[in-house]
Image (cartoon, rainbow, N blue to C red):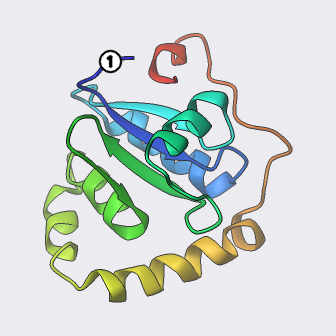
Amino acid sequence: MENYKKIILFDGVCNLCNTTVQFVIKNDKDDLFRFSALQSETGRKLLAERNIDTEDIDSIILIEPNVAYYTKSTAALEIGKNLKGLRTLSSILLWLPESFRNIVYDIVAKNRYKWYGKKESCMIPTPKLKDKFL
C-alpha cells in the first residue's frame, strides 16, 4: 500500500457513494486518493486497525496515513479540499460546527439507499482504474 496516498473508505453497495467515488477519481488531478469499499477485506482491515465501528459510521471515511482519519462530513469536506473547484467551498464549510454539519450528513446517510438506490454487490473497477483500488 502506498503510505502517502489518502484512502477513501466508502459503502461499496451505495449508488450515491459509488457516484461520489467516480466524481473524486475524475477530479483527482494530483492522484492523491486510493479507494476501498468498507465491505472489502482491505476496508475491514483498515477499520479494525483504527478501531472504527461500522455500526456508528457506515458511509465514508478518509484516512491520511500517519496523520489522522476523518469521518462523516469532515471526511467529505477534507476530500473536497483536495479537488479543484471544491477547495474554497470545502474550506469554508469546515468552519461550521461539526455537530451541525453531521446533522445534515446523517440525514443524507440515513436515506441514501431510499433516495439513490443500492447495488447487489460492490463496484468492480475497470482495468484502467484498478490501481486506484486497494
Q: Nearer the viewer, residue 134 or 50?
A: 50
> Along the horizontal axis of the image, is 90 left or right of 106?
left
Q: Assign the N terminus to one quadrant of the image.
A: top left
Q: Position of residue 73 (x, y in %)?
A: 38, 69
Disc 1, SS: loop
Q: Which kind of residue does numbered mark 1 sit on? A: Glu
> Along the horizontal axis of the image, is 40 left or right of 19?
right
Residue occupying the point 22% across, 75% down: 93
Residue occupying the point 24% across, 46% down: 83
Examine the rendering and report whether any part of residue 22 can be seen.
no
The outermost residue toward the top is: 127
Examine the rendering and report whether any part of residue 117 can be seen.
yes
Residue occupying the point 15% across, 65% down: 91
**Around disc 1, counting alpha carbons within 10 Å, would you say few (fewer than 14), some (14 to 19), or many (20 or more)?**
few
Residue occupying the point 34% across, 86% down: 99
Relative to 82, say whether 66 is above or below: above
Q: Position of residue 53 (x, y in %)?
A: 58, 59
The outermost residue toward the right is: 120
Q: Nearer the viewer, residue 23 or 34?
A: 34
* Residue assigned mark 1: 2
Relative to 17, say whether 7 is above or below: above
